[in-house]
Image (spheres, rainbow, N blue to C red):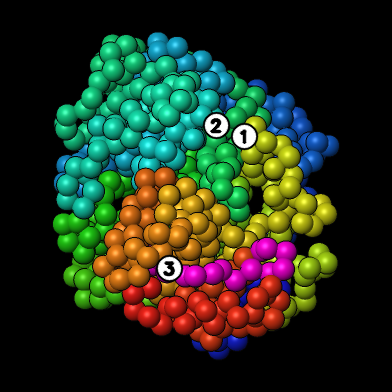
Amino acid sequence: MPENETTAPSLENLLHETRAFPPSPAFAAQANAQASLYEEAKADRLGFWADQARELVTWSTPFTQTLDWSGAPVAKWFADGKLNAAYNAVDRHVEAGLGDRVAIHFEGEPGDTRTVTYADLQREVSRAANALTALGVTQGDRVVIYLPMLVESVVAMLACARIGAPHSVVFGGFSADALRSRIADAEAKLVITADGGYRRGAPSALKPAVDEAVGPKDGEPASTVEHVLVVRRTGQDVAWTEGRDVWWHDALEHADTFHEPVAVDAEHPLFILYTSGTTGKPKGILHTTGGYLTQAAYTHKNVFDLKAESDVYWCTADIGWVTGHTYVVYGPLANGATQVIYEGTPDTPHRGRWWELVEKYQVSILYTAPTAIRTCMKWGEDIPAGFDLSSLRVLGSVGEPINPEAWMWYRRVIGGDTAPIVDTWWQTETGGIMISPLPGVTATKPGSAQVALPGIVADVVDDEAHSVPDGGGGYLVLSEPWPSMLRGIWGDLQRFKDTYWSRFEGLYFAGDGAKKDEDGDIWLLGRVDDVMNVSGHRLSTTEIESALVSHDVVAEAAVVGANDETTGQAVVAFVILRGEHADRASTPEGAEEVQAELRNHVAKEIGPIAKPRRILVVPELPKTRSGKIMRRLLRDVAENRTVGDATTLADSSVMDLISAGLAKPSASSED
Ligand code: PRX
């Protein structure tokens, strides 16, 4: 069984509370998805995907082959077809006479707004594509995008796609060091950033991190970056490197509004997105064009029941994460949707900001993360009750398991007890949704992602790769290739094979524990590897440990994800300090000082999102005889549980030592 199963809710408890919510006949009658989709896909899986690709995507050269799995585990989908993702997201809607349809209702945190139609988007993306070309970016060059949530962020991604330059978006909350390593790994030629953005009521800066990331540092040469394109958002002062830095508005002002999109092969790289793995080095997950776009459009249409002519869709994810790629940019735009993009935080300037936006734009489909729902629960239901949310008709959840209590609250308070909830399981690696109810078809169960989508084959297996019976638990695997699957880890084929394909022969190992209930529905139970999930963001324990030990005062570090009511998990670090520093931390003030230093250090190395919630100074770490840290025992400590079986420790008295040390108030702190 998965090692961290103890951290997941017990299935018995979940099932005890479970009620299934069948779709209303009215919804089912109008739904995009019908139960027959499952039958169709089962009867001819590849034919089913080929139909989706032909129906939902426009090809400049039609494909004749659906799947080539001869190079497994690197798949080729629709390989002899050609297309352009930006053309599919923008131009074809304008050509179909929908140029006046709103593509984006943008709402800045300070309250500034902008409405962008598909025709506007076509002009902007074309201009940006011409500007990138003028700056020397050509097909195949990598472009790093480090921006807040702005219209320009979407335009920048589509401009890259339009010229066949793979983009690599780096979340604005990552530090200069994290940005630097991603730029280096992707060997990016250009960075698109902004002076800053608005967050929590104040402008925050982005450009300084880029300046630090692209210049020479500590004997390392300057990066491969030739130009930095800078969007002016806040108007704050920025340092300027002549010849390298170019204002976005200057570059676009002189650029033509016509640009011919480049038809690329279906397997041409569309983007690289870095995500945390079980080792210290983030993985550059590679996605290509044709299969990715097909699954993005198919899932967006069916899982959210999108009616492009009447719905207003809002996905609250940042473009720095895969959810922002697939369900802010490529899926909704490929389907010609009208969507809301909001720059800021949910509580600025007040805790009803999201609900105010739902009311203002008459949002009908909302896609967000359990952490956000739990935060709103904490703030109280009288806040959403102050707004008219009756436009909402489908609610989505993503990023982490949603506890039944939050699910029920979401349904009742936000969805007026009628809107179906789709709990969507997927990953950066899968590119699109894989397991989810279909609204109008599935009787939904609070807390379960339930069933693999039509065309997807998922299973739960035991240690020997045997499918577990209904009622059993084990590891989630994907048994057949799917169109939007990752095509590898950028520059590291071996790591791709080792990470996903070596655990079980011929099966994709997702890294999640799961159970099947008596109906065969799937319940996700959290990661079984050293990846944490904090507020729906993936963080690696090893990466944070490396950051900690790179600080002078730390001799050794172990990091665990401890259960947290709001954020799902919270980062808790156990550190052994080097000799003289251990003395420094022996007083409460000294310990606090060291802990603050270390938290800031992690923020600098990785980003504020990775800051440990708690840092516990300990004299030893629990290790097996082979030297492996037993994180399970540390998790017991972090979650204030009785420490479990410690007999496999090299020195079983270590846990007593840790517990005794932590009993002293000076050894731990929380903020
Ligand atoms: O553990 C699963 C969890 O998030 C992981 C993927 O993280 P990331 O690549 O950052 O993508 C997040 C957005 C797709 C998975 O391995 N996860 C994601 N969605 C769910 C989930 N866990 C349970 N239920 C979900 N609906």
Decide if residue 388 is in sight here.
Answer: yes
**Which residues lie in the magenta part?**
608-628
Which residue is at the front of the view, 393 or 75? 75
Q: CA distance from mark 1 to mark 3?
A: 37 Å
Viewport quadrant of the N terminus: bottom right
User: In this figure, what is the number of numbered marks?
Assistant: 3
Q: Which residue is pictured at 29% across the width and 71% down the height? A: 588
Which residue is at the front of the view, 653 or 200? 653
Are the residues tagged 1 and 2 within 8 Å (C-beta)? yes
Residue named by callout 2: 185
The amino acid beneath tag 3 is Val
Are the residues tagged 1 and 3 within 8 Å (C-beta)? no
The answer to whether the beta carbon of the residue marked 3 is less than 8 Å from any atom of ligand 1 is no
The amino acid beneath tag 2 is Asp
Q: Which residue is pictured at 65% across the width and 75% down the height? A: 651
Residue named by callout 1: 490
Residue named by callout 3: 617
- Helix, strand or loop for disc 1: loop
The amino acid beneath tag 1 is Trp
- Helix, strand or loop for disc 3: strand
Q: Is residue 214 left or right of residue 657?
A: left
> Residue 237: x, y in percent?
17, 29
Q: Earlier in the sequence, mark 1 or mark 2?
A: 2
Q: CA distance from mark 3 to mark 2?
A: 34 Å
